[in-house]
Amino acid sequence: MSVIEEKLKLLPKDPGVYVMLGKEGQVIYVGKAKNLKNRVRQYFQGGAKPDKVLAMVKNIADFYYIIVPSEIDALSLENNLIKKYKPRYNILLKDDKTYPYLKINLKEDFPTFRITRRIKRDGAKYFGPYMGGISVNSLLDTLNLLYSVRPCDKALTEGKVLKPCLNYHLKKCLAPCAGGVTREEYLERIKAGVEFLSGDIAPAEKILKERMLAAAENQDFELALKYKESLAGLDKLKLKRVTAINRPLDADIIAFAANGIYSAANLLIVRGGRMLGSKNFSFESAALSASDAISEFILRYYKEGADIPAEIISAAPLTDAEVLEEYFKTVLGRSVAVHTAKQGVRRQLADMAEVNAGEHLSVAVDKIKHKDDMTVAACRSLQEKLGLKNYPHRMECYDISNISGVDKVGSMVVFTEGEADRDEYRRFKIKTFEGADDFRSLQEVLRRRFARMATDPDKFPKPDLMVIDGGKGQLSAVGEIFREENIEGIDLISLAKREEEIFLPGKSDPVVLSKSDYCLKMLQRIRDEAHRFAITYHRTLRGKRSLASVLDGVKGLGKLKKHALMERFRDLGGIINATKEELMQVEGIGEVQADRIMEKLNSEGLRHQ
């Protein structure tokens, strides 16, 4: 009798999380269960199952489980384990396009609207996402045009008076920084802006029409045209209204489609009774049913920081809707109604989402197959062709960048299952020696990497494969560190750029793969990404050093003000091209300081006088 059969007999009936392991001991699937005994046994019993589930079951060499007090605890633990291990058979939302939102923090004394693509649980209010032809920049322009709210990010407090910037003189801002408006008056403008973004468009439309006609009468045709363009943008918002809804509805509607191997989800986004648009996702999932898949999708999607609506509507029956609601309340601090679409407009929206999910699945299948060839299948093939000990689930690649030994940096990029895992990227500033020496630089980076692996394995987990950008010399230098640190269980290779030869420790002849081989293409991707990441960091350090050297000697310009300039203009080029008025918008930079900066740039020959 196999180990799995023995373990199935011993499963408890408690709620918990189960972890499926592959032949190499890697985590391939994480699931939650109200009853561990019933749930886990389902995978190994007879009966119809999706092909993807059957494929996963064939790859299960072992499993373990963790008993928890409640289903809510199971949801939280499942999320944490999926985030940590990124199992190939779970739903992983890594390639979804992010759409912009407008954000405002009403706790500020003089709040302002900002564009963002990431939602945080920071107490701010978010509007969006904006898609389907609605320009978030145009919407922000309309807000400023209507209500003259400040467009800058200066930290303002009531009673502290600053000098007004150019926007005030152009009548684009009421200058709360200079006391041009009281906090109470300013907050009334913000309140109107919030109501506008919440769906109350009529007052804004009336204001714009009146101003457009007034501008036309005054023969200010350029301004009148601007008001007309803003009105056209409002028309787009009005067209998004779902006419069958007789009250404001804030909901996400989710549908799922599968063909046994691949699957897709569609998310329709309705805010204030308006259809803002939809998102499509395609992935491989080992869920046993559409209900399970949608539940898992909900957990992954909103855990990543997406805007949480008042309602989440599933096109398929949900068996754990109450548990999901409790999870949102206790873990995410939001009251959300999670339910199945049954009739009326919600069912109509769910039917629409199902059509979109099915359509996306049919279109995406070829794309998914190609992606699988480029990633997971390439990982399996690479292990076989190079004779690696490990399946390269986690690959790390290292590169060094410097110019004549100055600002030496090292990069570490990570691919998980053949795809870039940017949250895991790390960078290193070379500290232990002067001058240019790529071999010593690599050795320093690897020593620090292995030290972190020993002291902080959660942030620096053990990789399956390390790829070094270079040839025999680089591989030999890193091999010395492997021996010095007694590193075992990690495969090591290097990729030489000129002939794209792959070198392995202990072998004199390189492995040469066909230029069309997906294994080589994957190695090229990770090598090029490591090079890009190293170059980016090197340029950042060089830019900061250049900024410091050019602006040294400007009276009154210390470290904090230089940092503020870098934050505002990104690099020295941005400062060189800035106008005096733009320089004065930076925190701490007044007219006298701006003149000094411009004089310094002129004296260095960096500005056209």
Image (spheres, rainbow, N blue to C red):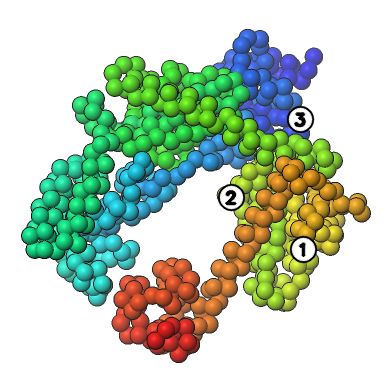
Q: Amino acid at mark 3?
A: Lys
Q: Residue type at mark 2: give it.
A: Arg
Drawn side of residue 579 relative to residue 285, left or right: left
Evaluate whether residue 484 shows in this view: no
Q: Quadrant of residue 148?
A: bottom left
Indicate the amino acid at tag 1.
Gln
Assign the C terminus to one quadrant of the image.
bottom left
Question: Which image quadrant for residue 13?
Answer: top right
Picture quarter containing residue 186?
A: bottom left
User: Disc 2 designates what residue?
Assistant: 422
Q: Are marks 3 and 1 in contact (CB under 8 Å)?
A: no
Dot 3 corresponds to which residue?
A: 23
- Mark 2 and mark 3: span between their CA atoms? 27 Å
Q: Say above or below: 5 vs 72.
A: above
Q: Quadrant of the N terminus?
A: top right
**One can see residue 394 in this view:** yes
Q: As rendered, which of 489 and 73 lies closer to the eye? A: 489
Is 98 left, or right, of 450 in this rendering?
left
- Find the residue positioned furthest to the top: 47
Which residue position is annotated with label 1?
Answer: 443
